[in-house]
Amino acid sequence: MSGKNILVTGGAGFIGSHLAQELEKRGNNVRILDNFVGGKQNLNYFDDKIEVMEGDCCNRDDCKKAVKGIDQVFHLAAHAAEGQSVFIPEFNAQTNIMGSIVMLTEAINAGIEEFAFTSSIAAYGKPESVPIKEIAKLNPEDPYAVTKKTFEDYLRVYYEIGQIKPYIVRFFNVYGPRQRMDDPYRGVVPIFINKCLKGERPLIFDDGLQKRAFTYITDVVEPICDLVGKEKLVNNPINIGTEEVYTVKELAEMTIEKMKADVEIEFINKRTSDVKVTYCDTSKAKELLGYKAKVSLSEGMDKTIEWAKEVGAQDFKYFDYTEIPKLTHKSYTSKKI
Ligand code: UD1
């Protein structure tokens, strides 16, 4: 395969850093653009062939520099926060919508056609039925999900006027090594693991019967590399994730058991806009990419726990900012929980 020049935005992040390495492994020249708000720790996994550029997708000059000489963009940079987005709608829109638009604009100005975007199952909102197929109506339930749907629309518009070939993947709940454990707002898997490492009680919002298809990192990184360039997938959003579905309570119990933690689960009230049951149908990915998730939750948890133990327990870092105090969930402000 001849190598392409590829830009990964958000390339220092959890999914972005794994993706950058996989693209490089496949013989491409990879550049990442990141503002390092999530830290620089994942750069330690890179060799010096991956070019690292510091910059922000909301900054036009940064985007201009980043797209120079690039053939394909994988746009991952975002503030990924569903529950949090409800009380920081302006920050959320600024980062996720404006940042995406500026990056897209500069990609178009640079004549780049292939533009992959990591959308989310969140864009479907509360589904009418599960598993959700790609043809389901997008009915976002929180501002973060609105940003995913909105940018999908921007991509479609610029595709229809012949400017871009968008590849849109809707990921499920992705987890694995390198996912931030110090983030108290999102990523139930690393939160539960970190709680167990610290000997603290995992908190379950609601009754724990929320269902999710927790998908191991390699099961999303490989297919997103495979799909770019496939004509049938241009402007044709695709669900990527596992078919295995677990409740949050089952996940908490599995984490406690695997980590032999001497802690009990604590239940507190539901997060605003939390979707109870959400998982997807992946038959389209099977048909068009021959895709099937390979890693079971049990195996993936073993690998993630092994990594987490090496890294060690982390202090949760609270984002001391709200635009709507009365909608700020208790767990987002109290440093005791
Ligand atoms: C996740 C993704 C989001 C993606 C979405 C698709 C992450 C970090 N976020 O959001 O980017 O768009 O999936 O659906 O993967 N929970 C608890 N206790 C906790 C933390 C969470 O009970 O301490 C519950 C939540 O209320 C929720 C479930 O666990 O019902 C999953 O939460 P979370 O991992 O934050 O993911 P989503 O909100 O599904």
Image: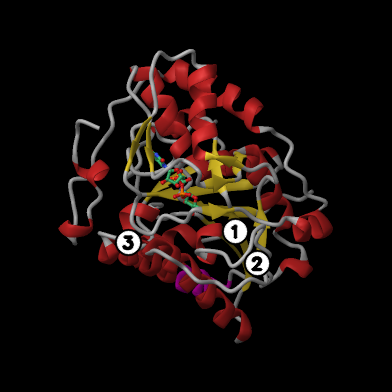
User: Is the CB of the residue bearing disc 2 within 8 angstroms of ligand 1?
Assistant: no
Within 10 Å of disc 2 (Cα), the crowding (few <14, some 14-19, many 20+) is many
Q: Amino acid at mark 2?
A: Pro
Magenta portion: prevailing SS class: helix
Image location (x, y in percent) of residue 27? 70, 43
**Residue sitting nearer the eye, 272 or 150:** 272
Q: Residue at x 22, y 53 (%)?
A: 328
Tell me the residue that label 2 is attached to. 237
Q: Quadrant of residue 216?
A: top right
Measuring 39% from the left and 27% from the top, which residue is drawn there?
A: 265
Q: Visible in this render: residue 105?
A: yes
* Between 230 and 67, the one nearer to me in the picture: 230
Residue occupying the point 59% across, 23% down: 303
Q: Amino acid at mark 3?
A: Asn
In this image, 222 relative to 19: left or right?
right
- Kind of residue sitting beneath label 1: Arg
Q: Is residue 267 above or below residue 232?
A: above
| Span highlighted in magenta in the image | 104-111
Q: Tell me whether circle 1 and circle 2 mark residues in contact (CB < 8 Å).
A: yes
Question: On the image, numbered disc 3 is attached to which residue?
Answer: 92
Name the secondary structure under disc 2.
Answer: loop
**Residue 138 image point, x, y percent:** 54, 71
Residue underneath mark 1: 170
**Mark 1 falls on what kind of element?**
strand
